Image: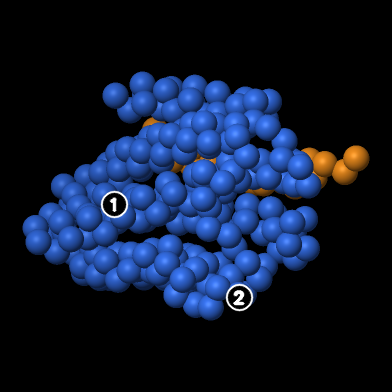
Chain colours: A orange, B blue
Amino acid sequence: MYNYLEYFLAAFIAVFIVLLVWFVVNIKKLRNL
Amino acid sequence: MNLSLFILSMIVMGCNIVSIVFLTPMVPDQEWAQKIFYLHVPLAWSGFLSYFFVMLAAIGYLFSKNLKYDRIGHAAAEIGTIFTGLVLVTGPIWATPIWGKPWIWEPRLITTLVLFIIYAGYFILRNVGIYRQRVALISAIIGIIAFLDIPIIFISVEFWAAEIQSHPQVEMNKQPSGILSPFLFSLFAFTNLMFTMLFLKLKVLYLEDREQNYV
């Protein structure tokens, strides 16, 4: 049965990557200041 | 304090992901696509809350001309825009299998897109290179005006003809059982994350201002 798992994964990965990049960028900035 | 809040929000978010993936019930017809709801709605709520802080900080700046309020507004606007951007990404991913197309030009989607575009303009303006106090003043004015869009997003369902509104009002008491508790937990996790990001960004902006002798 088709369960749309790939749509959930796509949304989840999009949220995860954007937030991860934001944290990495800002923690790097914090360390350099 | 920042580090403990960071660790706490990571633990809460980890529990939230486990809850969404393993504990929430599968809704017939939508299956996994429905679970996007646990990301999409809390992101929207946290984003709008963040924009509310932009407005409060803007009022604070207009009255006091203290750059501390500008930093709060700037940090909250950045987080609100990231969250609203993610709402505009997760929404179409959810809509594709359920509505059959990723985007429908209906009031709530349009007003949310308008909000995102206003804040895109806000950040362009912050980076045009005019002097710091002028940027703070104009940003505060935009922060207050842009917030007016948020009540419009909420009432857009009644504002325009209901028949063109394919975006249902979320009435939690009509949701299948087992959805409310994980949804509220997700709401808490994303709100907590939003505050963690806000404090982190405030620290970065404070140090940047100090480096340029504005503090």
Q: Residue B53: give its label.
A: 1
Considering every residue shown, the one lying at the far front of the view is B174
- Vertical comparison of B115 with B191: above or below: below
CA neighbours of label 2 inside 10 A, class few (<14), some (14 to 19), many (20+): few
Give the secondary structure at mark 1.
Answer: helix
Across and down, in percent, residue B150 comes to 38, 63
> Residue B123: which quarter of the image?
bottom left
Give the x, y percent position of residue B155: 42, 67
Judged left or right of residue B1, residue B40 is right
Subunit that carries the residue with mark 2: B
Instruction: Identify which residue, B76 or A6, lies in the foreground.
Output: A6
Q: Is residue B60 left or right of residue B212?
A: left
Chain name for mark 1: B
Residue type, label 1: Phe
Image quadrant in which the N terminus of chain B is located: top left
Question: Residue at the location (75% across, 65% down)?
Answer: B101
Q: What is the number of the mark on residue B164?
A: 2
Q: Amino acid at mark 2?
A: Ile
Q: Nearer the viewer, mark 1 or mark 2?
A: 2
Q: Position of residue B10 (x, y in %)?
A: 49, 26
Specify the farthest residue to the left. B64
**Which mark identifies residue B205?**
none
Crowd class of label 1 (few under 14; some 14 to 19; many from 20; radius 10 Å)? many
